[in-house]
Image (cartoon, helix red, strand yellow):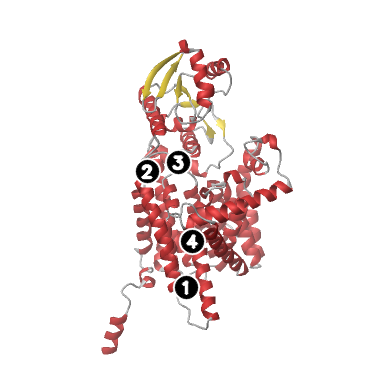
Amino acid sequence: MKKKRRQKATSPPFNLAQHERKPYFLPALGLCGLLMGILLFDANLSLTGDNAQFINLGRSLAGGYGLSETIEGEPIPHTKYPFGFPLLLAITDILFPGNLIALKGLVVVLYAISIPLTYLLIRRFAASPMALGVSALCLASPLLLDYSHQVMSEIPFLLFSLIALLLLHRAHNGSSTKDTKDTKGEKAFLFRICYLLRGVVGFACACPSWILLAIIAISAAYYIRSAGIILIGTGIIFFALHKKWKEAGLIAIGSVLLALPWQIRNTSLGGTPYIEQLLSINPYRPEEGALTFATLIERILANLELYGIQIIPHIFLPSFINTNYFVGIVFSGLLLYALIAGLIKRHLLIIYLTCYLGLYILWPDMWSDTRFLIPVIPILFYAILTSIDELLQLLARALKKTASRTGVVFFFLFLLGSNIYETNNLAKHIGQLPPQWNNYFAAAEWIRDNTRPHVKISCRKPYLMNAIANRKATGYAWKAPDQVIADFEQKGIHIVVIDQLGFRSTPEFLVPAIQAHENRFKILHIVRDPSTYVLTFK
């Protein structure tokens, strides 16, 4: 009895390994993600045009026009973005017609689900404290939280890529019960469904069912975001390195077959712009010509510097606004060590991370941005923490001392503190827009509430105008005044918006055209300070 009492008295107050086996553990992580998403929720649209374009595509699908651009009038088939994310938006728009908050809420839910999936995935390769630490960093990351409510494909792709990687790992290990990382809570959350699907597909075809599920998940990620092609390469390389040629071949064949209809459809419509953009020196200046070996090397070196010195360190230490070379070199060195060590071990997550980073090292450097790394932030956190852990253990062995995890804990707390600090700054700016953008959106809301549904608008940011006003919208010609007016007549323009967004095209082309043909315009509404004009065109 005394022995039992001593054991009870010395037991830790919080046993993570015990709690993770409970059915409430993973849903609790998901609720934490949902809470953070709600706390950092911003009802405003992102000022980039991409989210507004996704909204237009979703509404097009919901309206029965297929994956088409309906912003200007007649539906024009769209080939740039895959249909996966617009399809999710279309379902949401059918359930909540015209509700932008619902579309943003969908992304919040997907972010919340990605938190327990992150824990599940990291737990496959590391102890529970590491998995919980990575999940905590994802809950505090200002970059993830900033995109947790944006109508963009980064968070949906993050979710589906996590599922694909989980299933690739399961396909590699098979259905053996020897995998000690499986817990009752995990099966209740995700794998109970997978086991049911596994039984169904097992009868449906001769293909090993976990591989089939992995192929479906990879294809789903690909149809959410074209970067999903990296998951195909990851699966092939991973199984080939483990000399599982059958699995590698099945992923190659299965993924290609599932992607083929989309490729045939796009080819018949003229192809996607991505390949052309990738192979051009500057996508904004086609006259500069195609990429050469010399310009490719220049692009790689430019991206290595941008990502290695600025972008990647900013993900780990977002509160360091001006990341210096020393900090960049330290974190790039830690990441490089993780990549090399992981590739030697044929580590699934590191193979994926290497392929992912490799793609964006080849991407045009004028687009290099933290946005592209949003879907791999959990794996970047895992890689850097693992790198520190292994290096400290090597140092301890070199000094003939007992390895301690204290250094890893302090490093984790350092990263967590930086992310929390910047997340707090992010929270202070929720709902705030520059005055000129606030007035632009206010003008769009006025048009939505005070004009007929058939009117067509000419403005500087037509996708954003369309998303808010829910009216047909188009740009204006960057030409002489008479040609601008002729373009209005040809397009059947009813409303013209003069913005104060700061783009030179408005004062250079739009305003002179209106001044030259003043008798054909009438002011309908003005949003002041700075003044944004809504005009009717005769």
Number of marks in picture: 4
Q: Residue at x 48, y 55 (%)?
A: 315
Could you tell me how far apart the alpha carbons at marks 3 and 4 are, in whole angstroms? Answer: 30 Å
Pair 3/4: label in front: 4
Image quadrant holding the N terminus, namely: bottom left
In this picture, residue 293 sits left or right of residue 71: right
Question: Looking at the image, do the residues carrying marks 3 and 2 touch, with CB atoms under 8 Å apart?
Answer: no
Identify the amino acid type marked 2: Asp
Mark 3 vs 4: CB contact within 8 A:
no
Q: Position of residue 327 (x, y in %)?
A: 52, 60
Of circles 4 and 1, the one toward us is 4
Q: Alpha-carbon neighbours of circle 1 within 10 Å: few (<14), some, or many (≥20)?
A: few
**Residue 180: numbered disc:** 1
Earlier residue among tags 3 and 4 = 3
Task: Give the residue type that dot 4 points to.
Answer: Phe
Distance from the alpha carbon under mark 3 to that under mark 1: 38 Å
Residue toward you, 173 or 388? 388
Disc 4 secondary structure class: helix
Residue ID for mark 2: 42
> Considering depth in this image, is 187 or 8 the residue closer to the camera?
8
Image quadrant of residue 234? bottom right
What amino acid does circle 3 point to?
A: Leu
Quickly name the residue at label 3: 89
Q: Is residue 400 above or below residue 515?
A: below
